[in-house]
Image (cartoon, helix red, strand yellow):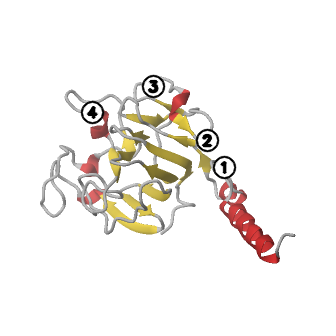
Amino acid sequence: MISRLMIGTVALVLTAATARGEENALTPAEKRDGWVLLFDGQTTQGWMSPKGKPLPQSHVQDGALNPHPCDYMLVYEKPLGNFVLSLDFKISRKCNSGVFLRTEPLTPRPGKDVGFNGIEIAIDDTQSAGLHDTGAIYDLVAPRTNAMKPVGEWNHMQITSDRNRIEIEVNGQVVTQIDLDQWTEPNKRPDGSGHKFDIAYKNHPRKGFIGLQDHGSDCWYRNIKLRTLDAATRRP
């Protein structure tokens, strides 16, 4: 005989699953709010290499996109301007990956990788909160805290890319913010300290490609969703 406790437990699990929604699918509320799904959970449709070439289906693993191994990053096929990007990620041991924004163009400069043409949100197997740790705007702004869960657990990241401002949330915490209008000199932060990029980010393209980086280790991404921002949808 099934106990009332067991029935209650099953009901709670089903209720939680319904509220969370299916993996790699939009809830009715998300559809009403204008979200679009960038990864269907089954194919690489909509994604390509930085050279515009199709991707092998081997990048799809258990309902997630794994960029390792690839030609530096998996790139979504359309350049994007102002948006909110929502995704889940799970790292492997010694993981080094990241989410690129505003990558423009996709042709690298001589002697540089294509990452120099974009802005990277770092994802790494570390516990510190420095310029190269999870949630950092790589080598530019360190996160307030490292809010990532342990290796093997799924994390949620939300990136708001809106004109001169970029904001990063990891597992519900706002960890990093930047106002690009304050970054007026190459290789220099607004406080005068140095960074590696020979770019004045005030003049960096405000529209470009997003990418999931391969830097030599497995990292899985799922529930990749995007909502464009305009005068009607952005917050004050």
Front one among 88 and 5 = 5
Viewer-nearest of labels 1 and 3? 1
In percent of width and height, residue 150 lies at 42, 60
Distance of label 2 from label 4 (alpha carbons): 28 Å
Distance of label 1 from label 2 (alpha carbons): 8 Å
- Screen quadrant of the N terminus: bottom right
Q: Earlier in the sequence, mark 1 or mark 2?
A: 1
Q: Earlier in the sequence, mark 4 or mark 1?
A: 1
Q: Earlier in the sequence, mark 2 or mark 4?
A: 2
Distance of label 4 from label 1 (alpha carbons): 33 Å
Which mark, by number, is residue 41? 2
Badge 2: few (under 14), some or many (20 or more) residues near its Cα, within 10 Å? many
Name the residue tied to disc 4. Answer: 113
Furthest residue in direction front, as rendered: 1
What residue appears at the point 60 percent right and 42 percent down from the top-left corner?
63
Tell me: residue 4, above or below residue 171: below
Residue type at mark 4: give it.
Asp
What residue appears at the point 82 percent right and 76 percent down from the top-left corner?
4
Name the residue tied to disc 1. Answer: 25
Q: Is residue 150 left or right of residue 193?
A: right
What residue appears at the point 50 percent right and 46 percent down from the top-left corner?
221
Name the residue tied to disc 3. Answer: 52
